Image: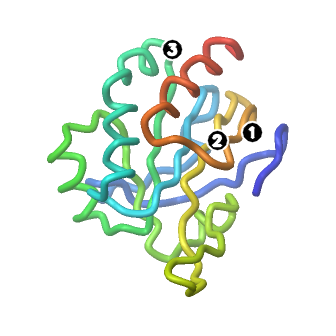
Amino acid sequence: MLTKQQTAPDFSLPDETGTTRTLTAEAGKWVVIYFYPKDDTPGCTKEACAIRDIYDEFAALGVTVFGVSKDSVASHAKFKEKYQLPFTLLSDETGEMIDAYGALQEKSMFGKKYMGIQRMSYLIDPTGKVAKLYPKVSPTEHAHEMLADLKDLQ
């Protein structure tokens, strides 16, 4: 997991349209990067819709929002359209960026251990450093928490 004031690793990933996005292209802006396990599942949908519902407030602050999972570009496109998500979804099918940010963690289900995506987020400041990290989040309340922190930090 990254730490506060650490430089966030750059990435080069396709969004839901297949357009390549990088962190360096967002230099000078605040960036929210949130990691989630899977498109169109209950918790992930609640989290995405909670961000969607207050997205105008993020946009008013000039914040770029990236949602990241291992789902394909096509899956992201369907998820974004189905729930009218106004922010960018990044496809990290190899898990390289997810791992670099510490979101690939050991999980357990029905007594079996496996590597999966931890629901977590980062606020990246305009210089590219981690301003705040959220190692575990509530899908329904996290958007408001990030927005309040962004208002305090700006």
Q: Residue at x 47, y 56 (%)?
A: 36
Q: Which residue is mark 1?
A: 130
Question: Which residue, as the protein is rendered here, is positioned at the far front?
Answer: 110
Amino acid type for the residue under numbered disc 1 = Val
* Position in image of residue 112 (x %, y %): 56, 87
Q: Indicate which label's residue lies in the foreground, 2 or 3.
A: 2
Secondary structure at badge 2 equals strand
Q: Residue at x 44, y 48 (%)?
A: 67
Tell me which numbered mark, 2 or 3, is placed earlier along the sequence: 3
**Rendered-image quadrant of the C terminus:** top right
Amino acid type for the residue under numbered disc 2 = Tyr
Instruction: Give the CA separation, mark 3 to mark 1.
Output: 17 Å
Amino acid type for the residue under numbered disc 3 = Leu
Q: Is residue 125 left or right of residue 11?
A: right
* Position in image of residue 129 (x %, y %): 76, 38
Secondary structure at badge 3 equals loop
Secondary structure at badge 1 equals strand
Question: Which residue, as the protein is rendered here, is positioned at the far bottom?
Answer: 112
Badge 3, how many Cα within 10 Å: few under 14, some, many 20+?
some
Q: Is residue 66 left or right of residue 43?
A: right
Q: Which residue is mark 3?
A: 61
Q: Residue at x 32, y 69 (%)?
A: 72
Tell me if label 1 and label 2 are in contact, CB under 8 Å: yes
Tell me which numbered mark, 3 or 1, is placed earlier along the sequence: 3
**Residue sitting nearer the eye, 17 or 5:** 5
Q: Which residue is mark 2?
A: 122
Q: Quadrant of residue 38?
A: bottom left
Instruction: Give the CA separation, mark 2 to mark 3.
Output: 16 Å
